[in-house]
Image (cartoon, rainbow, N blue to C red):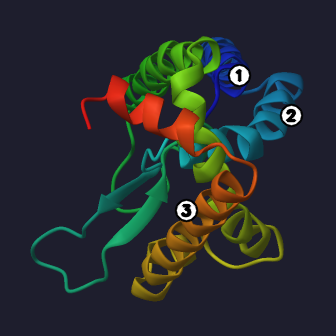
Amino acid sequence: MNYLSARRAEKAFIDFRRLCNEYWASNETSTEVRQQINHLLPALIEYARELKLSIHLLQGPPPAFSAPTLRLNVLRAVLEQEHGYAVIGRQQILDFVDQCIGATRQARRKGFWHLVFPLWWIIDIPAFAIGVPFKILRAVGFSDEVEETLIAHVAKLVMTVLLALVVIGLALRFGWAKYISEILKLFGR
């Protein structure tokens, strides 16, 4: 997540926290606030995914029952607290939202340094280029887990090697070798 996305995400989570408190203060009767919460949810779920935060809470049945474990979305639980085997408490939901706000602030600080310090660009630009095919796969409907499979990791390795070979080829073709050797001397090689 870059600096600007982290700022947008932080603002969205802070607004969501405020809306949660307003909704609960109205004894869950305000349809306008409920509508605003519903409009924010898709963006918040996407931000949490980008931050690599799990938005699901696993809830098992009481020990005497043999029922499946449920995956409950903590953000959606604002509107449906009595979903599952037990009520998800308001404080538990607010704690999760606060953790999301903290994660966005951390991502914003990290993103700021990546934005202003050019040496990070050497890492960020190739990482973005290698991640583009997976962003396309997610956009056409594949699950988020497609990027974490063994085949995806092998594909990333192959793309990294190919990208390095292209850069080396361009460096040799345009006479950048002397600049590359100077840069390597800076790193002690």
Q: Residue at x 56, y 15 (%)?
A: 117
Q: Residue furthest left?
A: 63
Whether pointer 2 and pointer 1 mark residues with C-beta atoms closer than 8 Å, the reply is: no
Front in this rendered view, residue 118 or 97: 118
Front in this rendered view, residue 189 or 94: 189
Tell me the element at label 3.
Answer: helix
Front in this rendered view, residue 144 or 166: 166
Q: Residue at x 74, y 75 (%)?
A: 137
Q: Which residue is mark 3?
A: 164
Query: The disc labelled 3 sits on which kind of residue?
Result: Ala
In the rendered structure, which disc, 2 or 1, sits on the residue that comes first in sequence? 1
Q: CA distance from mark 3 to mark 1?
A: 38 Å
Q: Residue at x 67, y 69 (%)?
A: 134
Query: The disc labelled 1 sits on which kind of residue?
Result: Ala
Residue 32, above or below 154: above
Give me the disc on residue 12: 1
Whether pointer 3 and pointer 2 mark residues with C-beta atoms closer than 8 Å, the reply is: no
For marks 2 and 1, give the one nearer the viewer: 1
